[in-house]
Amino acid sequence: MYPVLLVFPPPSEEQADTISPPLSILYVGAHLERAGVSVSYVDLRVQPLQTLLDELDKGPSLVGVSSMTGFQLVGTMDVLETVKKRQPGIKTVLGGVHASLLPEQTLSDPLVDFVVIGEGEITLLELVQELKSKKEDLSNIMGVGWKKKDGSIVINGQRPFMNMADAVAPITQSSLHLYQYYPIGKTQVARGCPFHCAFCYNTVFNRRKYRQKPLEVIEAEIRIITKMAPHVKHISLLADEIGFNHKRIVSMAKLTAKFGYSFHTAIRAENVDEKLVTEIDNICEELFIGVEHVSPRIRKMICKDNNVDDITQASQVLARSKIRPVWSFMTAFPEETREETLANMDYADMLRVQNPRSVISPFFLTTPFPGTELYVLAQKYGYRPPKDLRDWRDFGLGKVTMPWIDAKAENFSDLYGMSCLLFTSEKSYRRSDFEMQWFSYLKETAWQRWKARDIRFKKEWEMFLAYNRCMKVIPQKIL
């Protein structure tokens, strides 16, 4: 036996939306289980800290955590610190986007014993097998970073991408207890993206390689989710881009309908047309589409390959359907003017007028992820990246961390806070009558400021964050 505990970190103080299955640990864990490894799962977004402590007291041999760059690292570092304090002898492994982008720096932290770089399924399994056999030299495992006895760091060679046909369903008897907290199901239908948006982690993490999961594997996953979690009525077809083949998209839509689900997914604006929308209209509930920014200067800066006309046309098509579009925006770019910011807000309002069902995402602040083109550009504008893992915790989509923004005078974080509240529904935030009234008040205030283009929201946003930190009721079981 070499029992493994996989942990998804607790939420940030900004989190207000519906909790969904953490595929980053569920897919990896299911792959380990298929190979005979004993795996336990903890999701600290929905489970109390005591659950983690109880699992640690059972004596796992390895604890794995998955984290993106930024806000997730706050909870991740807390988890790793808890592990080392509670059970100093347990080895830890950090996987996910951040560890993959900065493996050596990540390993330099004493709380991290190993890193998994890129996809974790095969790499973590091989690591577990080697650790179980008590091997000290791990240099033959592709995609792993580790430390020798003398503390020196070793980053092994890059692992080839796995065959998507080998994926297993992200739900097992061991992880089933978590699904009582999730109102939706989720299956990953593709990995990567062939485009080269300057801000996207995909250009590094997936090396612009786009891989689709076979339809029969998707169907098998949905079948298992249906059998094991019958309360789920909606499913997320997870992909950074669902694809370019309309026939395949329609086939996936029919698969979800076959099992009684509606679905949502992400797609580029230029791939939305009348024929596709007509064929998926009664099955697809929501499409997530990246706008980012309407400024031609900024769109060129971030290498967006489509244009605003593509977005407007997609909006017009979706306005004639039942599908709810979710439009994603960004702001706080180098030299972004107030006129450019207001143009972005004006365009968001136009999308709402064109289609009242439109949902506008929070206006995410520019975050240059390590290895991306925007990361290189940011350094030309004076950005100095953190020198260790812990300092990356302050790097986030809603925080001002870039040197071209005057931290005292800026309103970009206000705009993020306002739009974050406008984006979130009372239903998805509410856990009590008081929370519903509290949230409704803040949301109405945000809406009035938005309409007046009065981008001042620091006090209200801090009140919201403080409440989430100290008072918010944790999500309850839905079963």
Image (tube, grey):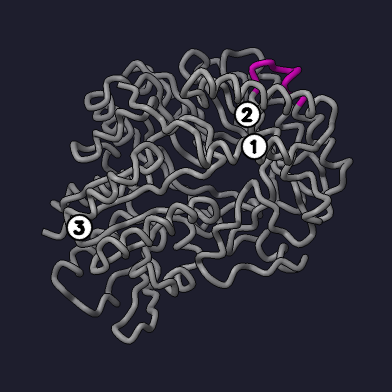
CB under 8 Å between callouts 1 and 3? no
Query: Gap in Å between the C-alphas at discs 1 and 3?
Result: 39 Å
Q: Is residue 160 visible?
A: no
Give the prevailing secondary structure in the magenta stretch: helix
**Residue drawn at 66 percent across, 50 percent down:** 399
Q: Nearer the viewer, residue 168 or 44?
A: 44
For mark 3, what is the residue? Answer: 60
Dividing the image into 4 quarters, which one contains the N terminus? Answer: bottom left
**Residue drawn at 70 percent across, 22 percent down:** 444
Residue 151 lies, in percent from the top left, at 36, 83
Mark 3 is surrounded, within 10 Å at the Cα level, by few (under 14), some (14 to 19) or many (20 or more) other residues, namely many
Mark 1 is surrounded, within 10 Å at the Cα level, by few (under 14), some (14 to 19) or many (20 or more) other residues, namely few
Q: Mark 1 vs mark 3: give the one in front.
A: 1
Mark toward the start of the polypeptide (1 vs 3): 3
Q: Please, which residue is most extreme toward the bottom here?
A: 150
Residue 478 lies, in percent from the top left, at 34, 23
Q: Name the side, left or right, on which 204 lies relative to 181.
A: right
Check the image and report above or below for 268 versus 250.
below
Q: Is residue 193 visible?
A: yes
For mark 1, what is the residue? Answer: 463
- Which label number is shown at residue 423? 2
Q: Nearer the viewer, residue 233 or 456?
A: 456
Mark toward the start of the polypeptide (2 vs 3): 3
Q: Secondary structure at mark 3?
A: loop
**In magenta segment, residue 53:** no
Q: Which residues are magenta?
A: 349-358
Mark 2 is surrounded, within 10 Å at the Cα level, by few (under 14), some (14 to 19) or many (20 or more) other residues, namely some
Query: Gap in Å between the C-alphas at discs 2 and 1?
Result: 17 Å
Residue 361 lies, in percent from the top left, at 64, 33
- Which label number is shown at residue 320? none
Q: Name the side, left or right, on which 386 lies relative to 137.
A: right
Q: Nearer the viewer, residue 322 or 113?
A: 113
